[in-house]
Amino acid sequence: MSPDELVYLGVLAASIPVGFLFRYLSPPVKQGAGLLLGLSIAIATCHIHTLHSLATVIGIWIIIKSSWRHAPALSLTWTFLYLLFFRLATWFGLPQPTPFANAIQLLLTLKMVSLANEVYTFHIEKKNEVSSFAKSPVIGGLSQEPSLYDILSYSYCYAGIMTGPFFRFQTYADWLRQPSPQALPGWVPCLQRLKLVPVYAALFLSVNSVFPLAYVRTEEFLDRNVFFRVFYMVAVFFVFRMRFYAAWCGAEAGCISAGLGCYPEKALSKPGGGPSVTYSPDPSNEEKYDFKTIQNIDCYNTDFCVKVRHGMRYWNMTVQWWLHHYIYPNAPFKAYALRAGWTMFISAYWHGLHVGYYLSFLTIPLCIAAETAMEASVRARLGPSGQNIFDWVHWFLKMRAYDYMCMGFVLLKASDTINYWTSIYFIIHIIAVCCIIVGRVLKGGKREGSRGDKGEKKEVEEKPGEKTD
C-alpha cells in the first residue's frame, strides 16, 4: 500500500471508535467537535491547500446571502470553475494540491451545490407558506437558513471528509438534533458493514500484487497474446472494485458508529438524499432503523445486476443521487441517451481533467444504447427460458464493459487508454455498435422520447442469482 493509502486507512479506522464517542455529546458540542476534528484532519493532510476548500465554502456563503434565488446555478458554476482552478493551480504559480486536498475538494463540491439547492427550496417553500397559509409539503426541508458557522461545520464535518459518503445538510442537521443517539442501532449494523472488509482488503492486496497496473504500460505486455490482454482488464477491474468496496464499507461504518444518516425504516431513505416520505414516531411500536441514507455501495448488486445502467445505481450511490437530482434534470437535451451522456460528461469533469475519465464515462451511453436496442429487438421476442439465457449473456457483457471502461479510469492518459483499447481491438466499442445495428435491422428498437425510458421506475429488474435485502 502507498503512504497515501495508509493515511486514508488510518483516518477510516480512527473514525469508527470516535463515532461512538460522538453519540454522548450534546448537539452544540457535537457540532463544534465534528468541525474541529474535521478541520484538523484537513490541515494535517492538506496543509496550506486547506485554503482551497475554505475559499469554496466562503464563496457559497456569499452566493446564498446575496442571491438565494440564483443559488443553484451560481453554486454549480462557482464550485466547478473553482475545481478547474484547483486542478490548474500550477499554471498560476501555486503548489500542486495534495491527493487529500483533491478528495476533500471533490466531496465539498457536492455538498455546496446540494446546500445551495436546499436553501433555495427553503426560501421558495417559505414564501408559498406565507401566501397559501399551508405547511410546506417538502420532505426533510430546512427549518431555517444555515449560518456561516453551520456551513463550515457541515463542510468540515469529520465523518467522510475524505472518503465520503456524500450527505445533505439536512441529514447533518438531523444528526445534530437526534433526541437519543445512544439508543439508536450502532454496533450491530457497524459490524455488519465491516465483516467483509478484511476479505475485500486481502483480495485487493493479493490480486494487485499479481496483476499490477503498471505492467499494462510496458512493451512486454503488448507482446502477450490478445486473450491475456483481455483477461488483464478483468483482473484490474476486480482490484479496483475490491479497493473501493473496502474503503466505502469502512467509511459507511464510520458514519454508522456516529449515528449519522440513521432514520426509521418507514422513512424510505435514499442514499445521499435521506427520507423520501414523511414519517412520525410511533410510541406504541418499537421503531426499526436503517442507514440507507449513507449507503454508498451495494457490493452484491454491483457485481450481479444485469444492465450497465443498473450497475451505476449501486456504485458510489450517494454521488449517483446527486447527479440524478442536480445534473440529469438540467441537461440541455431531451433524449435519454443524450441526457445520460451529459451526466456522464459532468461526472468525468468532477473526477478530473484526465482524458481517460472522459473516454470511459462517455462509453457508458453507447453501452446503454446497445443494451436498449437488444432488449427491444431480441429479448422482447424470447420466451421465459430464452430471456433467462439472454440475461446471463447480458450480465457477462455488462461486466466486460465495465472492465473495459475501468482501464481508461485507472490509466488516465489518453495515449495509455487508446494503446490498451487498441491492443484488444476496441472490442467493447465494436460489440456495442454491432448490437445497435442489429437492433435497428430487426426494427425492434424504440426511439427514446424526451422523458427517457417509459416505465423505467416501474421496471422489475431481472438479475442472475439476485438477492433482496
Image (spheres, rainbow, N blue to C red):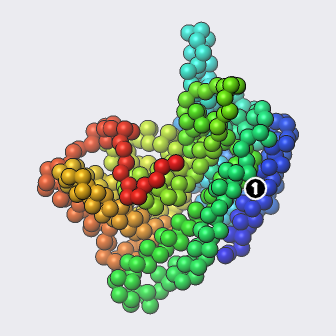
- Split into 4 quadrants, where in the image is the N terminus? bottom right
Instruction: Pick the residue in front: 420 or 304.
Output: 304
Mark 1 surroundings: few (<14), some (14-19) or many (≥20) residues within 10 A: many
Out of 333 and 26, give the one closest to the viewer. Answer: 26
Residue at numbered disc 1:
16
Q: Residue at x 32, y 67 (%)?
A: 428
Decide if residue 391 is on the left or right side of residue 273.
left
Q: Residue at x 65, y 61 (%)?
A: 195
Which one is nearer the viewer's eye here, 368 or 348? Answer: 368
Judged from the image, the secondary structure of the residue bearing numbered disc 1 is helix
Q: Residue at x 80, y 55 (%)?
A: 17
Q: Position of residue 196 (x, y in %)?
A: 62, 64
Up-down relation of residue 196 to residue 60 (above or below): below
Q: Vertical placement of 298 versus 286: above or below? A: below
Q: Where in the figure is residue 150, as x and y percent of width and height?
A: 75, 36
Residue 42 position within the rendered picture, expressed as x and y whole percent measured from the top left: 76, 56
Q: Is residue 455 visible?
A: yes
Residue type at tag 1:
Ile
| Residue 273, image quadrant | top right
